[in-house]
């Protein structure tokens, strides 16, 4: 197994995160949402101003995954404001690194962080058309709690499942 590291993002990592997101999102979501929506969401999420919230926060975190020193993915997570609940906000890997246990490594990291902060529930949202990711999350112990449609502006919506996992079992 190659050398794998997962470390908190720094300001110097912001361009890397943006490049990873651009590559991953365009390949992964093109069959689920329009390119116009992908462009809109990338532009709104991966600016230095938006990424800066993960630095020195006590409520949200982002980690950069590297394989043999080369950026391969990232994950982010945050307290939800509901006592005992954390949300997995993002978990993304470049396609060439999928199926190697790296997503599971990031998910375990988030679960450990949630438990360490006294959380008993981990939530996430996933596009209803994202069958592969839904299957991965089900295998990891998540269940669908509800369907939800989120208006994200500019005429776009996110049509998602909200999934949860108990961390007490």
Image: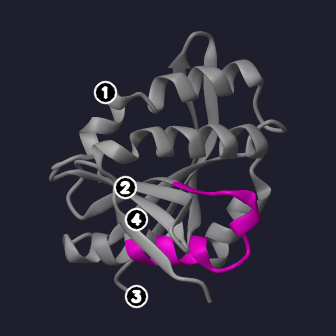
Name the N-terminal-most of marks 1 and 2: 1
Image position, residue 114 (x, y; %): 30, 70
Image position, residue 102 (x, y; %): 59, 75
Kindly identify which numbered label has been placed on residue 103.
none
Of badges 2 and 4, nearer the viewer stands 2
Distance from disc 1 to disc 2, alpha carbons, whole Å, reads 17 Å
The N terminus sits in image quarter = bottom right
Q: Residue at x 39, y 47 (%)?
A: 13
Distance from disc 1 to disc 4, alpha carbons, whole Å, reads 26 Å
Name the N-terminal-most of marks 1 and 4: 1
Of badges 1 and 2, nearer the viewer stands 1
Look at mark 1 in the image and give the residue it sits on.
Answer: 49
Distance from disc 3 to disc 2, alpha carbons, whole Å, reads 21 Å
Distance from disc 2 to disc 4, alpha carbons, whole Å, reads 9 Å
Name the N-terminal-most of marks 3 and 1: 1
Distance from disc 3 to disc 4, alpha carbons, whole Å, reads 12 Å
Question: Neighbour class for label 2 at 10 Å: few (<14), some, many (≥20)?
Answer: many
Mark 3 vs 4: CB contact within 8 A = no
Look at mark 3 in the image and give the residue it sits on.
Answer: 169
Give the magenta part as a residue range: 91-109
Name the N-terminal-most of marks 2 and 4: 2
Kindly identify which numbered label has been placed on residue 122.
4
Image position, residue 9 (x, y; %): 34, 53
- Identify whether 41 is placed above or below 104: above
């Amino acid at each position: 197994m190659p050398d794998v590291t997962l470390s908190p993002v720094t300001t110097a990592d912001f361009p890397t995160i943006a490049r990873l997101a651009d590559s991953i999102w365009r390949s992964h979501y093109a069959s689920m949402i329009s390119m116009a929506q992908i462009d809109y969401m990338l532009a709104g999420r991966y600016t230095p101003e938006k990424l800066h919230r993960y630095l020195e926060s006590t409520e949200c975190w982002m980690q950069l995954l590297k394989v043999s020193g080369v950026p391969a993915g990232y994950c982010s997570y945050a307290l939800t404001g509901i006592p005992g609940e954390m949300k997995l906000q993002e978990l993304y890997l470049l396609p060439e690194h999928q199926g190697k246990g790296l997503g599971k490594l990031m998910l375990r990291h988030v679960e450990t962080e949630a438990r360490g902060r006294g959380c008993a529930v981990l939530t996430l949202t996933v596009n209803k058309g994202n069958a592969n990711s839904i299957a991965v999350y089900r295998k990891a112990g998540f269940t669908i709690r509800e369907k939800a449609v989120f208006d994200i502006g500019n005429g776009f919506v996110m049509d998602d499942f909200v999934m949860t996992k108990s961390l007490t079992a």
